[in-house]
């Protein structure tokens, strides 16, 4: 944060001589003192200018800073495609149990039987939910799950002697990680157009599908919040060409217990445990992106996999055709724990209810928001929907970004903006199942109010936040995280 951005918050609190610690008198003998052991040239030449501050001021400073963030615990957070649902606090307590939290990943299998059983169960639950029998818990996020599955596909085609399959087909509505993963895995990406109805254009798919196709990556429901109703026909077309179908499982929150990717023809998929199964995320992680694949692809999964032998569990590294590790140790265990708790708590019927309520909430909000904004694709939607601010742009020169910034003034996190790219001035809302009707109504009222506000107020929003409109690219690529004295 630089000085201009920090207006309103006093950063320079240091006063010489203030302390918030009291150390015991040093009882280390001179001969054992670190400054006696390190060669003089490596020692600090001057006392570091560390802040000197009393405890109460220090606590207030950081508490006030933390309260300037929006989070799912403080604000409605309808960030489309991110499934910002409530993260039950019970999961935090369980994940912190010393029996789990204090394990070391290098411990012998015999001493971590409980943990291995839990991971093994998680593998089985994810297999059952997807209808795809073999699971790797290793990938650390959805994007890494995509990449891992594409490595698996490459190994499969290599074994079959079909290295001419160089192409990965990706719909134009797909998340950017799909083409990025395909490129990183060494494939050529071919874009498939969406039709006017927002679904995959079958004619375009047929014209680009061929003997050189390796994988079709599809998101279902897609990023417009629409179920790809032709999915069965699509998967049959791909299979007839000997290609594989990959399901981007970021939108599993819409279909849990209702339909299974394996049943509608997907051969591989990833989960975003941090979205669908309540891992706390946002602010950069941590993620967990396990993949599930068909049985004939199991041998290529990253090793190790947890296996059960009698009533014992062990990590199986003996997988000669495995693509190798994609992450250290066994995956993002802490997030997998939380997902495990969630699945066990809800059970099959509860998970189905989650999706039913997520879809209901999205359709309710869609109906309310469409009173003031265009919603380009016909409903009903699945767990999210995409509206457009293009009418505001046409009539008032107000952009989707201005609407998002203004929402912050009213205490709501913004929706996803300018994605998917097939909708101009896109605003993508995903309310999730955990929000009440009152919250959805309050949000809808604000959206409608904003549509009628003074354009200048919108263009200069937010008016209540210290950081208002940072350079979005630089904020991510060259963040200034330290305050410096002017
Ligand atoms: C549709 C879709 N696919 C893939 C991803 C990538 O997932 P992750 O952020 O866990 O890497 C996202 C993330 O937002 C997404 O929305």
Image: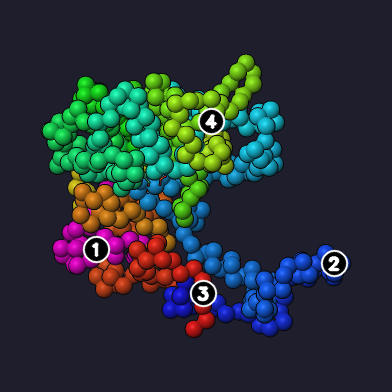
State the separation of the CA atoms marked 1 and 3: 31 Å
Query: For the point 43% across and 79% down, which residue is it?
Result: 4
Query: For the point 22% across and 44% down, which residue is it?
Result: 172
Q: Identify the mark nearer the N-term, 3 or 2.
A: 2
State the separation of the CA atoms marked 4 and 3: 44 Å
Question: Height in image: 475 above or below 293?
Answer: below
What color scheme is it? rainbow
- Kindly identify which residue carries mark 2: 31
Query: For the point 43% across and 32% down, which residue is it?
Result: 323
Q: Secondary structure at mark 4?
A: loop
Label 4 near label 2: C-beta < 8 Å? no
List x then y, in percent, for residue 43: 69, 73
Q: Identify the mark nearer the N-term, 4 or 3.
A: 4
For ligand 1, the image quadrant comes to top left
Mark 3 vs mark 2: in front: 2
Mark 4 vs mark 3: in front: 4
Q: Secondary structure at mark 2?
A: helix
- Kindly identify which residue carries mark 1: 399
State the separation of the CA atoms marked 1 and 4: 49 Å
The stretch of residues the image draws in magenta is 379-407
Q: Identify the mark nearer the N-term, 2 or 1.
A: 2
Q: Viewer-proximal residue, 82 or 34?
A: 34
List x then y, in percent, for residue 355: 39, 35
Dot 1 alpha-carbon crowd within 10 angstroms: few under 14, some 14 to 19, many 20 or more: many
Asked whether the viewer can see residue 162, the reply is yes
- Kindly identify which residue carries mark 3: 483
């Amino acid at each position: 944060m630089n000085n201009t951005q920090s207006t309103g918050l006093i950063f320079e609190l240091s006063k010489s001589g203030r302390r918030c610690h009291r150390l015991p008198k040093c009882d280390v003998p001179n001969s054992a003192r670190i400054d006696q052991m390190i060669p003089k040239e490596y020692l600090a030449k001057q006392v570091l200018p560390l802040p000197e501050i009393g405890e109460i001021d220090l606590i207030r400073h950081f508490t006030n800073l933390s309260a300037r963030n929006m989070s799912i615990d403080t604000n409605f957070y309808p960030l489309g495609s991110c499934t910002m649902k409530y993260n039950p606090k019970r999961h935090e307590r369980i994940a912190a149990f010393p029996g789990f939290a204090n394990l070391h990943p290098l411990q012998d299998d015999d001493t971590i039987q409980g943990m291995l059983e839990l991971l093994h169960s998680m593998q089985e639950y994810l297999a059952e939910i997807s209808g795809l029998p073999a699971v790797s818990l290793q990938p650390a996020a959805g994007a890494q799950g995509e990449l891992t599955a594409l490595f698996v596909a490459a190994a499969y085609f290599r074994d079959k002697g079909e290295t001419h399959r160089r192409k990965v087909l990706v719909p134009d509505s797909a998340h950017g990680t799909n083409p990025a993963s395909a490129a990183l895995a060494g494939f050529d990406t071919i874009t498939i157009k969406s039709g006017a109805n927002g679904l995959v254009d079958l004619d375009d798919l047929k014209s680009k599908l061929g003997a050189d196709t390796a994988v079709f990556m599809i998101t279902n429901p897609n990023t417009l919040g629409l179920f790809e109703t032709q999915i069965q026909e699509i998967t049959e077309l791909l299979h007839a060409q000997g290609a594989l179908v990959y399901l981007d499982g970021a939108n599993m929150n819409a279909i849990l217990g209702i339909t299974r990717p394996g049943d509608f023809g997907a051969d591989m998929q990833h989960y975003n445990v941090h979205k669908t199964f309540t891992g706390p995320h946002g602010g950069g992680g941590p993620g967990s992106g396990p993949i599930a694949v068909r049985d004939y692809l199991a041998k290529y999964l990253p090793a190790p996999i947890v296996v059960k032998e009698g009533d014992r569990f062990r990590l199986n590294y003996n997988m000669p055709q495995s693509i190798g590790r994609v992450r250290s140790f066994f995956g993002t265990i802490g997030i997998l724990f939380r997902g495990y708790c969630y699945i066990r708590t809800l059970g099959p019927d509860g998970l189905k209810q989650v999706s039913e309520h997520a879809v209901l909430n999205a359709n309710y909000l869609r109906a309310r928001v469409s009173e003031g904004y265009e919603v380009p694709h016909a409903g009903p939607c699945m767990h999210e929907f995409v509206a457009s601010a293009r009418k505001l742009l046409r009539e008032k020169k107000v952009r989707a970004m201005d609407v998002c910034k203004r929402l912050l003034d009213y205490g709501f996190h913004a929706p996803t903006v300018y994605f998917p790219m097939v909708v101009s001035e896109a605003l993508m809302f995903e309310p999730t199942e955990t929000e009440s009707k009152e919250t959805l109504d309050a949000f809808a009222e604000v959206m409608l109010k904003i549509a009628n506000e003074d354009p200048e107020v919108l263009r200069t929003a937010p008016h209540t936040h210290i950081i208002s409109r940072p350079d979005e690219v630089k904020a991510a690529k060259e963040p200034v995280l330290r305050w410096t004295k002017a």
